[in-house]
Structure formats: C-alpha cells, structure tokens
Image (spheres, rainbow, N blue to C red):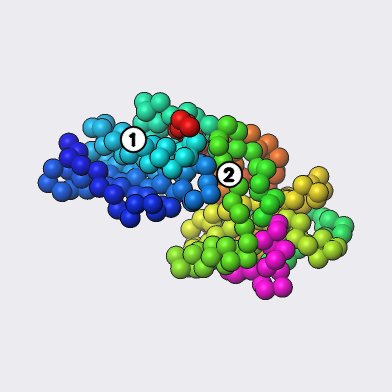
Amino acid sequence: MTSRIVSLVEPGSDFPAWIAEGGDGRPLGTAFLRAPASAKTGELRINVHPAERRSGVGTRLLNEAIAAGTARGLTALLGDVVTEGSEGDAFCVAAGLRRVLALTYTRLDLASWTGVSEPERGGYRLIHWEGTVPDELAETAARSRKAMDDMPMDDAAWEPDEWDVPRLHMIAEAVAKRGEILLTTAAIGADGEIAGFTEVVVAGDGGGDGQHYGTGVLPEHRGRGLARWMKTEQITHVRGRFPDLAGLLADTADSNTAMRRVNDSLGYVPTHRSLLYQADLAG
C-alpha cells in the first residue's frame, strides 16, 4: 500500500514529477508532468510497477498531477498514449479520463519492399540531411514546422509547439545523445523555402526498425503529392544508407486520412492501435 507521494522537483518547476513510495521506501510508481509556463495543456505520463497495479497507486499519482495542473491554471492534462486493450487503457477508463484520439501504428517491411516509382514534382527539389539541419536551411526549416500545426488531433486539447532554430538543434542533439541518427528529407520550392519535410530516426548501428517522427507539408503546397514523393525518396535513401535496417514504423491518427492513404499506398501494414486520454480540469 502507498504510504506517501514524494515530489521529485522544486516547487514551481515546468516539469513536476512525483514518486509513490511504499511503507518500506520501495518505489511503486512515478508521474511526470510537462507543463511549460505559457501552456494551457499539460502532458502527463504515469508508470506503476506491474506488481503494484490495481492497488490505488496510479490513482493517487493522477490526483497529485490533477491538483498541480489545476493550481497552475491548466485546462487539461493529456495522458500518455496507451495501447488499446492494455492495462493502461483500462486504468484511464476506470479513472474517468476522456478518450480524445485514436492512432494506428504501421510498419513497412524493407526486406520485401520493392520500391515505388514516383515522378518528380515540377518546381520542387528534394534534399536529404542527417542530424542537425545545415546552417543555410535552418531558418526556413524552422518556419516549415508550422506544417504540423493543423494536423488532425480530434478532441485533444493539443497545443502546437513553438519552433525556432535553437529548438531544431536541441532535438537533433537529443537524438544524437541517445546514439541514434535523425534523417530528414525536405522539399524545397522555387523560392528556396522548404515546402514540406519528413523525418525518420534510425539506431546508431543501422539495425532493427527505424521510427518516423513527422511528415508535414505547408498548406499552400498541399495537393501536389509532396508527402508521398518525400516519403518514397526517403525510404529509398534510408534503405541504401542502412542496408541492415529491417523496417520503418509510423503512427498516424485514425482521422488523418491523407497520411494514412500515403502510408497504405507505400505498403505500411497496421500492427496495433493506441489511444490518447485527457483529463479536463476546472477553471
């Protein structure tokens, strides 16, 4: 049984965290809340040791996070994505959280992928880079991130991230510190501005499955097939760069019909579904 909830950070931190301890001091579970000062929605992740589940540990951690979020003036907490039918799914339902988004996870088997013939798009050219964006493209790359601002998020109280060049560098450095490789393919228009991009992260040894991070096309460049072109060329590029790579993983909101259509056409096969839950706060 939980004896106490202990805060792991100083009061007022943008990233409050708690640990649930048993009477003998054993850690039973943790909760982490990402809530930057300007945000109205917090991102919550709760983990409970399997042996301690269904004993109230998760509920106490959730209540602690809700209290902290309410005190900060947040309007909602977005829970961690959970696999449909899992214990996490059951916990969210039992806790009264609201299901706001469903995602389908897919995989492309590179060993059996025969390639796709995809014509170039007039007025655009593609460029690939690894790791940090080249200096000459940094500013337009930061501007291009707005392509993700209107991605389908259904009922989730999701707030688009603010992007600038330092944030781009920070993300690339974080991936590199994990021993992984960030690869980006971008479509550049006649004006020299990035019109769209797609990203994938590969393990440092080039094995296993790579993970897609994001694909976006700015609104004024949509309807030209850029997403499919970029993804096709990136798959070809990554496959040649990492011949031992087994597959590529992607997750897409069920309501994002445009991206689902692109992935289906390239041979991505569904593996499972996950759900995003939300706690609506008073205030």
Question: x, y percentage for residue 8?
Answer: 30, 53
Which residue corresponds to mark 1?
63
Three-letter code, disc 2: Glu
Q: Is residue 23 left or right of residue 149?
A: left
Kindly indicate the quadrant of the structure image that contains residue 101.
top right
Label at residue 2? none
- In the rendered image, residue 166 lying in the magenta stretch gets the answer no
Disc 1, SS: helix
Q: Which residues are magenta?
A: 130-144
Q: Horizontal and vertical percent for residue 230?
A: 72, 56
In the image, 103 versus 106, the foreground residue is 103
Residue, disc 2: 159
> Depth check: 90 or 163 in front?
163
In the rendered structure, which amino acid carries the disc numbered 1? Asn
Q: Residue furthest left?
A: 24
Looking at the image, tell me whether mark 2 or mark 1 is earlier in sequence order. Answer: 1
Where is residue 98? Give x, y as percent: 47, 28
Frontmost residue, 16 versus 21: 16
Callout 2 environment at 10 Å: few (<14), some (14 to 19), or many (20+)? few
Judge whether residue 142 is colored magenta: yes
* Residue 23 showing in the rendered view: yes
3 vs 35: above or below: above
Are the two marked residues, 2 and 1, in contact with CB atoms closer than 8 angstroms? Answer: no
